[in-house]
């Protein structure tokens, strides 16, 4: 699926040609405005919404999100497009961006951002909607909006606090400074730094995750995302319910049978 600003392709979970057809799929979503450093404009937001529709229908076992080229994941929102916005137009753009990014965040499939180059402003906000962030050696992250006399509008004030803590998030957003890959890992913003091709590392990680029971992986994501604002007792109650639901799946029967029989499990996502 190739739209103007977002490309979507699928790869098999298994790299074994004999198993590829039945192994499930990994979706690779590429932001594609390389001449503009993949800056996020209204068209990209609309195209991302269409890709999310396709992902809902395809139900891949994992999703990898990256940017075209080596210079940027997404260098931010498109300032040339926003410069003439009124206050009403700016708020509407922020709300639409928040809505689409929330859809990405709540996909049932695990999501991995493979960040190559700049992930600034809206690009950083987009990466933070993914479950895991892998940083290329040249990656840099930041919310520099105050340097333009505005604030993050696609969820940065909320998600950055949850990623790195209140004090550090405030420091980053009030100074507008950027952090390199190694500091992003130290802060907990990124999972690891890839010394080679970050997309290759993201696909390897996606395959490791996708080789497990798809329903169980989705349940792990639900247990974390849907309970992060609950107290521990409510969270534990939700966990127990989700744990129980796993035992209503064919994959649970297959996984435990394979363990007992000492053979590889063949999960179907059912």
Image: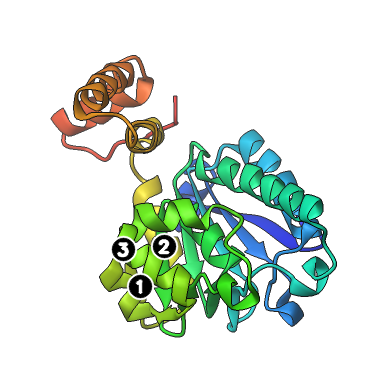
SS at circle 1: helix
Residue drawn at 40 percent across, 79 percent down: 179
**Vertical placement of residue 210 versus 41, above or below:** above
Looking at the picture, how far across and down is residue 221, in whole percent?
Answer: 37, 38
Residue drawn at 67 percent across, 65 percent down: 31
Q: CA distance from mark 3 to mark 2?
A: 21 Å
Viewer-nearest residue: 236 or 29: 236
Asked if the residues shown at circle 1 and circle 2 are in contact, with their CB atoms under 8 angstroms apart, the answer is: yes
Residue 73: quadrant of the picture: bottom right
Of label 3 and label 1, which has the lower sequence position? 3
Q: Which residue is mark 1?
A: 184
Residue drawn at 74 percent across, 45 percent down: 50
Q: CA distance from mark 1 to mark 2?
A: 10 Å
Q: Which mark is residue 167?
A: 3
Comparing marks 1 and 2, which lies closer to the viewer?
1
Comparing marks 3 and 1, which lies closer to the viewer?
3
Q: Which residue is mark 2?
A: 133
Q: CA distance from mark 3 to mark 1?
A: 15 Å
Asked if the residues shown at circle 3 and circle 1 are in contact, with their CB atoms under 8 angstroms apart, the answer is: no
């Amino acid at each position: 699926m190739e739209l103007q600003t977002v490309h979507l392709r699928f790869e098999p979970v298994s790299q074994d040609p004999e198993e590829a057809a039945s192994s499930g799929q990994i979706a690779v979503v590429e932001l594609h405005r390389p001449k503009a450093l993949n800056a996020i404009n209204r068209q990209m937001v609309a195209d991302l919404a269409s890709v999310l529709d396709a992902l809902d229908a395809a139900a891949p076992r994992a999703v990898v999100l990256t940017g075209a080229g080596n210079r940027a994941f997404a260098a931010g929102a498109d300032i040339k497009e926003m410069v003439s916005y009124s206050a009403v137009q700016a708020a509407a753009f922020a709300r639409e961006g928040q809505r689409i990014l929330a859809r990405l965040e709540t996909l049932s499939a695990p999501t991995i951002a493979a960040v190559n180059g700049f992930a600034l402003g809206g690009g950083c906000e987009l990466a933070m909607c993914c479950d895991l962030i892998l940083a290329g050696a040249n990656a840099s992250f930041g919310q520099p909006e105050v340097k333009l006399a505005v604030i993050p509008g696609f969820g940065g004030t909320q998600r950055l606090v949850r990623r790195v803590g209140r004090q550090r998030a405030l420091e980053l957003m009030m100074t507008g400074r950027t952090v390199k890959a190694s500091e992003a890992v130290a802060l907990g913003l990124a999972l690891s730094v890839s010394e080679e091709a970050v997309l290759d590392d993201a696909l390897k990680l996606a395959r490791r995750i996708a080789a497990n029971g798809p329903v169980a992986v989705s349940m792990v994501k639900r247990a974390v995302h849907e309970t992060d604002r609950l107290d521990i007792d409510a969270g534990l109650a939700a966990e127990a319910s989700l744990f129980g639901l796993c035992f209503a799946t064919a994959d649970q029967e297959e996984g435990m049978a394979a363990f007992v029989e000492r053979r590889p499990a063949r999960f179907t996502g059912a």
